[in-house]
Amino acid sequence: MWSAGRERAGYGWRGVCAGVCGAGRSALGCARGGHADRIAARHPAGHIARAALEAIAFQVADVLEAVHSETGTPLAALRVDGGASVNDLLMQFQADVLGVPVVRPQVTETTALGAAYLAGLATDSGGPECCGPAEGDTRFEPQMDAADRKARRGQWQRAWSG
């Protein structure tokens, strides 16, 4: 947050909260609204972008925490794909916030890859086996210590609850 507790870093999540909540705002418990016009006037674009990336990572952590609390199954690693996964800063911060490795495949658009595999199977030209094992995965290991992780998650929780 740009208010209490986050000034030292120069970026924050309060104004980004509504943007990442979207339609799930009430279900996710987001008590804050965003004012992008006020944020942009006072803060550099890089700080706003960093806050948005951190908000994504914290929301993923919140969802995975809920899954863990329901299933009791700990997360050993997070496999990612899609457009945001190409951002190394986001992937490293995600690993740091979760405290587990984040693994990104060489081909980040796995939905398209799956469609191609199905097309190959439908035309008898092969499926996943035609391409061999996945190689070239990028692995992001957590580098944040547990105390810092806990403090940052606490700041995020307070930003949500207002």
Image (cartoon, helix red, strand yellow):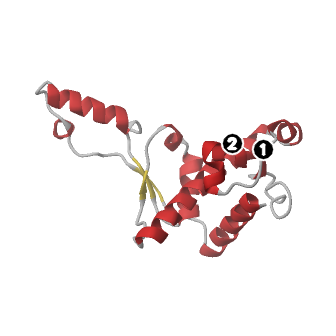
Count of marks placed on residues: 2
In the image, residue 14 sits, relative to residue 101, either above or below, namely above
Residue at (60% x, 49% y) in the render:
56
Are the residues tagged 1 and 2 within 8 Å (C-beta)? yes
Amino acid type of the residue tagged 2 in the rendering:
Gly
Q: The residue tagged with tag 2: helix, strand or loop?
A: helix
Q: Is residue 161 visible?
A: yes
Mark on residue 34?
1
Where's residue 57, x and y in %? 59, 53
Label 1 Cα neighbours within 10 Å, binned few <14 / some 14-19 / many ≥20: some
Query: Residue 99 at x, y = what percent?
Result: 52, 67
- Farthest-out residue, front: 26
Q: Residues within 10 Å of mark 2 (few under 14, many from 20)?
A: some
| First in residue order: circle 1 vs circle 2 | 2
Q: Is residue 158 above or below residue 49?
A: below
Q: Is residue 9 above or below residue 127?
A: below
Residue at x 39% of width, y 70% of height:
73
Please tell me whether residue 46 is drawn above or below residue 98 in the rendered image: above
Kindly identify the residue that appears in the image at 55 percent across and 46 percent down.
Answer: 88
**Which secondary structure lies at badge 1?**
loop
Residue lying farthest top?
Answer: 123
Hey, which residue is sitting farthest left in the picture?
A: 124
Q: Quadrant of the N terminus?
A: bottom right
Residue 117 percent across, percent down from the top left:
23, 33
From where the camera sits, is residue 142 visible?
no
For residue 24, side relative to residue 18 (left or right): left
Residue 46 badge: none
Left or right: 12 with respect to 141? right
Indicate the position of residue 113 as horizontal and vertical percent values. 31, 34
Q: Which residue is mark 2?
A: 19
Query: Distance of mark 1 from mark 2, alpha carbons?
Result: 7 Å
